[in-house]
Amino acid sequence: MANQVPVAEGVFTWPSEEPRLLASRCTACGNHMFPIQQDCPKCSGSSTERVELGRTGTLWTWTIQGYPPKSPPYAGDDDPVTFEPFGVGYVEIDGIVRVESRLTTADRDELEIGMELEMVLDPLYINDDGDEVVTFAFAPANSGGA
């Protein structure tokens, strides 16, 4: 098995048996932000602290990405011939923040607004060093992950 590496530092706990997304919480108003931000867009406060979000959430809305995203910023080795559509959604975590995320399924029959999801690590591509780059995604809570 290839060595796994995170798609970016500071997005989720790494390495971790139960990875969690990393967010900011404004110390002035309590607003949560993902990804981590230094300033609060809600109250303009400039004091935030790093927090780990819960591993589960509810699907707030979703769609299917039916064509390869533009690169950059998208990182991956898909091209129009090998590309497979994937689910994308907003997941509400702990009732405090909505996170845009890949979903582990693109099957419309498996996705429903309000369903419970759990965070998993999902392979994205193999980098030039031969490492498997992983990103976070959300899977239906009863599916057993990716």
Image (cartoon, rainbow, N blue to C red):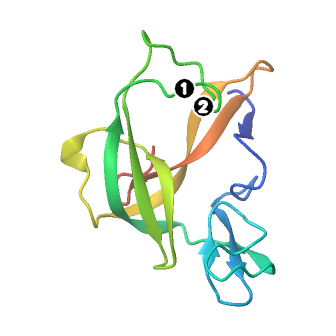
* Quarter occupied by residue 10: bottom right
Which quarter of the figure is the N terminus placed in?
Answer: top right
Q: Residues within 10 Å of mark 2 (few under 14, many from 20)?
A: few
x then y, percent, for residue 125: 62, 26
* Front residue of 26 and 114: 26
* Quarter occupied by residue 76: top right
Q: Residues within 10 Å of mark 1 (few under 14, many from 20)?
A: few
- Looking at the image, do the residues carrying marks 2 and 1 touch, with CB atoms under 8 Å apart? yes
Against 48, is 103 above or below? above
Q: Regarding mark 1 in the picture, which secondary structure is present there?
A: loop
In-image side of 12 versus 98 (left or right): right
Find the residue positioned furthest to the front: 44
Residue hosting label 2: 74
Q: Amino acid at mark 1?
A: Lys
Against 62, is 5 above or below? above
The residue lying at 59 percent from left, 19 percent from top is: 77
In-image side of 139 versus 132 (left or right): left
x then y, percent, for residue 113: 26, 61
Query: Is residue 47 shown to the viewer in this render?
Result: yes
Residue hosting label 1: 70
Q: Regarding mark 2 in the picture, which secondary structure is present there?
A: loop
Find the residue positioned furthest to the left: 109
x then y, percent, for residue 22: 69, 64
Against 79, is 30 above or below? below
x then y, percent, for residue 45: 75, 82
Q: CA distance from mark 2 to mark 1?
A: 6 Å
The residue lying at 61 percent from left, 43 percent from top is: 135
Q: Amino acid at mark 2?
A: Tyr
In-image side of 93 versus 87 (left or right): right
Query: Is residue 142 shown to the viewer in this render?
Result: no
